[in-house]
Amino acid sequence: MIPMVNLQAQYVEIKAEVERGLAETITNCAFILGPNVQAFEQEAAAYLGVKHAIGVASGTDALHLALIAEGIGAGDEVITTAFTFIATAEAIKYVGATPVFVDIDPKTFNISPAAIARAITPKTKAIMPVHLFGQPADMTRIQQLCEQHQLKLIEDACQSFGARINGKQTGTLGDAGGYSFFPSKNLGAFGDGGLVVTNSDTTAAKIKQLRNHGSDVRYYHDVIGYNSRLDEMQAVILRVKLKRIDQYNQARRDVAQLYSELLSDLPLTTPFADGLGEHVYHQYTLLSDCRDDILKALQAKQIGCAVYYPVPLHQQNVFKAEYASVSLPITEAVASRCFALPICPFLADDTIKEIAGVIRGVFTVN
Ligand SMILES: *Cc1c(COP(=O)(O)O)cnc(C)c1O
């Protein structure tokens, strides 16, 4: 059996260091906002080249708290993509704002700057691009639009930790960025976790307050906040993995390159590798007209495969009444043809060849 992500293989390599750190934390009993959260925040900020990094309970919370801190609320429109995980839009809804879904670029699957430009209204307050599957969105043009129309820029970098564009880290190019450490993410904890980054002292101070019950000084509360802290145990694990993130991301790129070489002559679309920035392949996503045959063949061989995402957000049950008049032809076409193959830093060349062989078989039989 070949899983989508082989977390065990990664654990074997870091086991001793992780277990030493966890044992120390248990011995010291500093479980909430302890020394490892503080150290991880400093190390992550240094790695990402950003002034502030604030650990929170999840990627969803990171986006939610970033929107609150940037003053986005009821009556505001936030332009984003419908080809993403639901949490992007949930965060916008939590603050009472309206997600405005626009179409994507057919090659990168990321939000289209031209479509953003057409959707800007006097109510637009922010743009929330997603660096989907680890591929940076077209930030130069998105930043221009934000400057031109005085919009906030909040990046959903939940799938793109370590992906650079224009020499900078995704997540650090706007007013605030959110990352997720969900276990299967390319920087994953052993449970939930998230991070907000910003270069603004004001935004950072607000996020620190919001994650801790609206409090700067214990038992003194200035605003209604949340219980949304990065767990100390998760910080221990993240510190170990952060040291290796460039190596992990490079290994993912190597896996992707081999897949793309092996599949290049088949009638399917491999991920666009000449994007504007460095793709970190959180997912390796292809397009095919015979997706269902491919998925069936892979499943029959117990090879992991998945569809991210089968239903774009504007067509989800939760949103379809509200967005009945919205049509996003590229998003819809991609969602009906996309599928993802196993990817992680520990996928052997032989396994990649085996998976590619199964896909080749689908086309030879037909
Ligand atoms: C995973 C993910 C989130 C949410 O992160 P959680 O840590 O699971 O809350 C948000 N946006 C995108 C694009 C994601 O992939």
Image (cartoon, rainbow, N blue to C red):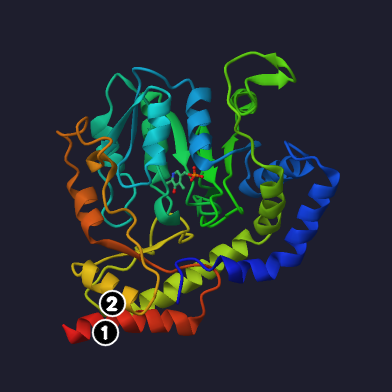
Q: What residue sits 49% from the left and 72% below the top? A: 254
Residue 99, position as x, y percentages in the image:
32, 31
What kind of element bears circle 2?
Answer: helix
CA gap, disc 1 and disc 2:
8 Å
Asked if residue 144 shows in the view, the reply is no
Residue 155, position as x, y percentages in the image:
46, 39
Reply above or below: 145 against 48: above
Residue 12 numbered mark, or none: none
Q: Name the residue under label 2.
A: 297
In the rendered image, the quadrant that contains the N terminus is bottom left
- Circle 2 crowding by C-alpha within 10 Å: few under 14, some 14–19, many from 20: some
Labels 1 and 2: the sequence-earlier one: 2
Residue 106, position as x, y percentages in the image:
26, 54
- Is 87 situated left or right of 247 in this image? left
Q: What residue sits 28% from the left and 28% below the top? A: 120
Q: What residue sits 49% from the left and 50% below the top? A: 166
Q: Name the residue under label 1.
A: 361
Amino acid residing under circle 1: Gly
What kind of element bears circle 1?
Answer: helix
Residue 249 vs residue 345, the one in the foreground: 345
Identify the residue at the far right of this view. Answer: 28
Asked if residue 67 shows in the view, the reply is yes
- Is 319 situated left or right of 227 in this image? left
